[in-house]
Image (cartoon, rainbow, N blue to C red):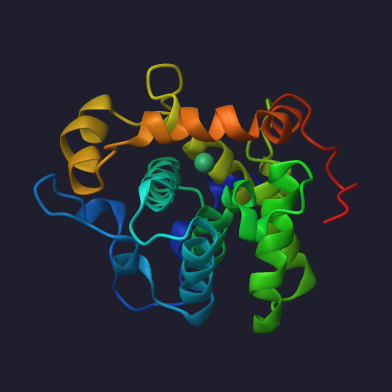
Amino acid sequence: MASGANPEEQTVEARAGSANSAARLTWRDIRGPVRRRADDLIATEAEEASLEALRVATCETDGGMERHTVRQYLIAERIADTRHISYDRELLLCASFLHDAGLYSPASTGDVYIKDSARYARRTLEPFGWPQERLRVCLDACEQHHAFTTRWWLGPEVELVRLSDAVEVYPELRRSGIPRSWLKQELWQAVPRRGFWPATLEITRTHWRRMLPGMFRPPAPGQSDT
Ligand SMILES: [Fe+2]
């Protein structure tokens, strides 16, 4: 799915509609008082399977990690729309649901967690018969989401997950053009961050050995063994 064209020059509709076209929740629908859930985003079987896989991994529904992925996905959508970046919605949503799943025992092999996230995404999505290139972009989005430098050249979805995850986790440090007022008054009300930091600190305390290599030494693109 990696494109040689400048993503800034592409139209959103060109690829966003390729996976599905039915109306469903987008970032533009977010209104603070209206509670939103991951199920509101689902439109395809692959998306449904990815959400179910996340729920199996975390052993909960609408839990802190699930809400993190929903916020991160909606932020990614907004970044893409604001910059007029084309993306594959189904791929982006599946990657968003699964990018942190490797932290949890059902998805873990004990390896660096971003690699396990990619492996879990492969197991989840292979039954859907995606072209290898498309599946690779999704796995790269999981495996490269802590990279320090841009990953546009691996596919817009890879970079969108990287950018949006940083905004979601560190909104005081990284904003990628997302207004803090929208985060605070709309997104964080519609998809609450309640419990986010205690859960994040607990995950970090428990899994830091499997997190740090992925965060500070992202694997070289093209050399993945996932
Ligand atoms: Fe994340």
User: 188 above or below 155?
Assistant: above
Which residue: 20% across, 28% down?
181
**For residue 39, which quarter of the picture?**
bottom left
Q: Position of residue 3 (x, y in %)?
A: 71, 54
Q: Nearer the viewer, residue 148 or 82?
A: 148
Q: Quadrant of residue 205?
A: top right
- Left or right: residue 205 versus residue 210 is left
User: Is 187 on the left or on the right of 209, as rendered?
Assistant: left
Q: Quadrant of the C terminus?
A: bottom right
Can the viewer see residue 23 in this picture? yes
Compared to residue 40, the image places residue 195 above or below, namely above
**What percent of the width, then of the height, locates residue 76?**
44, 46
Residue 141 horizontal/vertical position (percent): 65, 50
Q: Is residue 47 above or below residue 3?
A: below
Residue in the image at 88% along x and 53% along y: 225
Q: Is residue 19 visible?
A: no
Which residue is drawn at the image coordinates 64% and 51% (left, top)? 102
- Left/right placement of residue 217 relative to residue 40 reads right
Residue 177 horizontal/vertical position (percent): 39, 28
Q: Residue at x 40, y 45 (%)?
A: 68
In which image quadrant can residue 130 be found? bottom right
- Give the quarter of the figure containing the N terminus: bottom right
